[in-house]
């Protein structure tokens, strides 16, 4: 079904279409597509549920089709159509969705339906400046604050005007004005879309054999979701220091502070800290890390435009009111001797930020993926959370999936 935002997106492209019909322009058009099938299971031992156990199975196919048109190398437009359909089993709950809710089923946020996921015009201006206006996917830094949630079948996109500049060598400047978010739960979900008047700025500078230093601001002002309105300011350092020919020091050091904004009635004064350190050697990265999202039992550090961090079970998609502390160990990279085969392994240990918060638990995430030379890949994910508490919100959970992707 063609939705009203699809019609608006096409209308935004109409002036460019008329212009190209009257003046002779050289057009470069590229069509691409992808098909991703995923079989995902989620078993959550929720003592608050009637059955005491919430299970879901989602067997879905995502089809994506894109058209990328460039006009004389200075302008163009991009269209991205996605469709998510059930294939076989359909026994899962999409959070906040009126027609895809199943009592006591564990949440898997892959709503069925069709969507014009992206539709924007693009201008390539002097000074290595790119401007985009329309519905677009955004992924800033590691996705902690703004992400397209590409793991989910229905990607997150935003109505936005964005500017990217790289005129000065090693310096990047990105700005965005955001007016609406379309979340992965789909437009029909009660939280599937939200209007706003928000801004972000992200500035980065790369130093040879040292890494990237960045500073950012996310100024979110929601029209209706007023408790999500916050101002966040932060800095981050992504080290990349070569030691000899085969070892590189890697990691992350990031700090951000957050206050309430707009009509938000809450009194927020929360910080975020991430510290990771490790080495990359032989095609494999090894890291250890510590992260804090502060919370005081009522107010907390929030990231309402982000994709799930802190574990594949997605139990900590939303920061608990008591905040979240975690230790982590990870290894990921190419498996020696097998071309195209890679793995990921992460261990998390969670605890609340406040001393009176409930005990949490630990999680083990394992994944493996094979990418062929013929543009297809297969893989699996396994995530198991083991709770240390009797609180209904944080019980044992197991989420696993197998998937296959074909790009064409």
Image: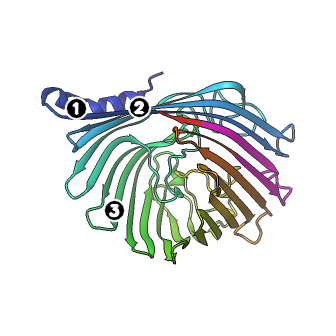
Crowd tier of the residue under label 2, counting other residues whose Cα lies within 10 Å: few below 14, some 14–19, many 20 or above: some
> In the picture, residue 123 is in which quadrant?
top left
Please tell me whether mark 3 or mark 1 is closer to you in this view.
3
Mark nearer the viewer, 3 or 2: 3
Q: Secondary structure at mark 3?
A: strand
User: Residue pushed farthest bottom?
Assistant: 243
Q: Position of residue 204 (x, y in %)?
A: 39, 67
Identify the residue at image location x=66%, y=56%.
Answer: 344
Is residue 86 shown to the viewer in this render? yes
Spatial separation of the CA atoms under disc 3 and disc 2: 29 Å
Extreme front residue here?
A: 337
Residue 323 seen anywhere in this rendered image of the structure? no
Position in image of residue 74 (x %, y %):
21, 44
Is 166 inside the magenta-drawn segment? no
In the visual, does 276 lie left or right of 354? left
Query: In this orientation, which residue lies closer to the viewer: 108 or 288?
Result: 288
**Which color mode does the image show?**
rainbow
Q: Nearer the viewer, residue 354 or 313?
A: 313
Is tag 3's residue or tag 2's residue first in the polypeptide sequence? 2
Q: CA distance from mark 2 to mark 1?
A: 17 Å
Query: Which mark identifies residue 5?
Result: 2
| Residue under pointer 1 | 15
Q: Magenta residues?
A: 381-404
Residue pointed to by mark 3: 173
Earlier along the polypeptide chain: callout 3 or callout 1? 1
């Amino acid at each position: 079904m063609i939705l009203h935002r699809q019609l608006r997106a096409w209308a935004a492209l109409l002036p460019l279409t008329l212009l190209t019909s009257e003046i002779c322009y050289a057009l470069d058009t590229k069509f691409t597509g992808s098909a991703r099938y995923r079989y995902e299971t989620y078993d959550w031992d929720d003592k608050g549920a009637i059955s005491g156990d919430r299970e879901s199975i989602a067997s879905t196919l995502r089809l994506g089709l894109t058209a990328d048109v460039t006009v004389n190398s200075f302008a163009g437009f991009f269209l991205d159509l996605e469709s998510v359909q059930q294939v076989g089993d359909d026994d899962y709950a999409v959070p906040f969705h009126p027609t895809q809710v199943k009592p006591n089923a564990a949440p898997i946020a892959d709503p069925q339906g069709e969507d014009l996921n992206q539709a924007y015009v693009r201008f390539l201006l002097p000074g290595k400046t790119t401007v985009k206006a329309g519905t677009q996917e955004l992924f800033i830094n590691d996705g902690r604050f703004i992400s397209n949630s590409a793991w989910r079948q229905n990607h997150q996109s935003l109505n936005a005007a964005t500017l990217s500049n790289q005129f000065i060598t090693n310096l990047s400047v990105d700005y965005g004005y955001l007016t609406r978010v379309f979340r992965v739960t789909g437009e029909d979900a009660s939280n599937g879309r939200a209007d706003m008047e928000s801004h972000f700025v992200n500035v980065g500078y790369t130093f040879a054999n040292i890494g990237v230093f960045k500073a950012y601001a996310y100024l979110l002002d929601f029209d209706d979701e007023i408790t999500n309105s916050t101002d966040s300011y932060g800095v981050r350092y992504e080290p990349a220091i070569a030691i000899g020919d085969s070892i590189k020091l890697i990691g992350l050091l990031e700090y951000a502070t957050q206050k309430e904004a707009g009509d938000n009635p809450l009194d927020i004064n929360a910080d975020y800290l991430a510290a990771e350190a490790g080495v990359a050697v032989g095609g494999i990265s090894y890291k250890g890390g510590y992260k804090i999202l502060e919370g005081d039992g009522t107010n907390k550090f929030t990231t309402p435009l982000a994709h799930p961090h802190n574990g594949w079970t997605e139990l900590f998609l939303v920061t608990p009111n008591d905040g979240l502390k975690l230790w982590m160990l990870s290894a990921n990279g190419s498996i020696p001797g097998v071309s195209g085969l890679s793995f990921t392994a992460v261990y998390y240990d969670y605890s609340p930020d406040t001393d009176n918060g409930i005990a949490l638990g630990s999680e083990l995430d394992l994944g493996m993926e094979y990418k062929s030379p013929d543009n297809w890949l297969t893989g699996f994910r396994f995530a198991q959370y083991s709770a240390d508490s009797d609180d209904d919100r944080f019980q044992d959970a197991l989420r696993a999936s197998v998937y296959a992707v074909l790009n064409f």
